[in-house]
Amino acid sequence: MNSTWGGISIKNRSMSRSRIDIAVDILRVAMKGSNKSRIVCEANVNFNIATKYLEMLKDKELVMYEKGLFITTDKGKVFHEAAKEVKL
């Protein structure tokens, strides 16, 4: 359910994102390299969730950790694009 506030559509807070949506958001933020704090802020997840997902994404080789940054791998970019297409 969406409501509007000042002409801006606001999603109902009870609507949660799927695991795929969260992973896609994290991959998007990490495209050019991001630290965990930036991922937490821009993907709108808490620190514990970010840690859990980043470990899972590293295990699946969708992101890599290098010089203090998480970076989306080529495999992660393919996954990101495929997930976006399915969502459409």
Image (tube, rainbow, N blue to C red):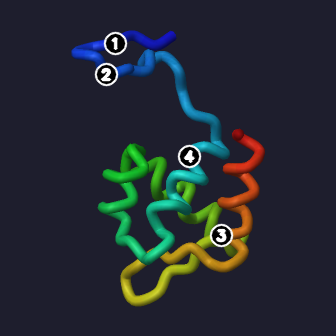
Vertical arrangement, residue 2 with respect to residue 60, above or below: above
Q: Most extreme residue toward the front, as rendered?
A: 7
Q: Disc 4 versus disc 1: distance between alpha carbons? A: 24 Å
Q: Disc 2 versus disc 4: distance between alpha carbons? A: 23 Å
Q: Which residue is mark 4?
A: 22
For the point 64% across and 61% down, the residue is 56
Which mark is on residue 4? 1
Query: Is there a contact, CB below 8 Å, between mark 3 and mark 4?
Result: no
Side (left or right) of 3 relative to 73: left
Of the image marks 2 and 4, the number of the one nearer the N terminus? 2
- Mark whose residue sits in front, 2 or 4: 2
Query: Is there a contact, CB below 8 Å, between mark 2 and mark 1?
Result: yes
Is disc 2 placed on a helix, strand or loop?
strand
Q: Disc 2 versus disc 1: distance between alpha carbons? A: 5 Å
Q: Most extreme residue toward the bottom, as rendered?
A: 67
Side (left or right) of 71 relative to 73: left
Kind of residue at badge 3? Lys
The 10 Å Cα crowd at callout 4, few under 14, some 14 to 19, many 20 or more, is some
Q: Which residue is mark 3?
A: 77
For the point 72% across and 74% down, the residue is 75
Kind of residue at badge 1? Thr
Q: Which residue is mark 2?
A: 8
Of the image marks 3 and 4, the number of the one nearer the N terminus? 4
For the point 77% across and 44% down, the residue is 86
Q: Position of residue 14 (x, y in %)?
A: 48, 16
Of the image marks 4 and 1, the number of the one nearer the N terminus? 1
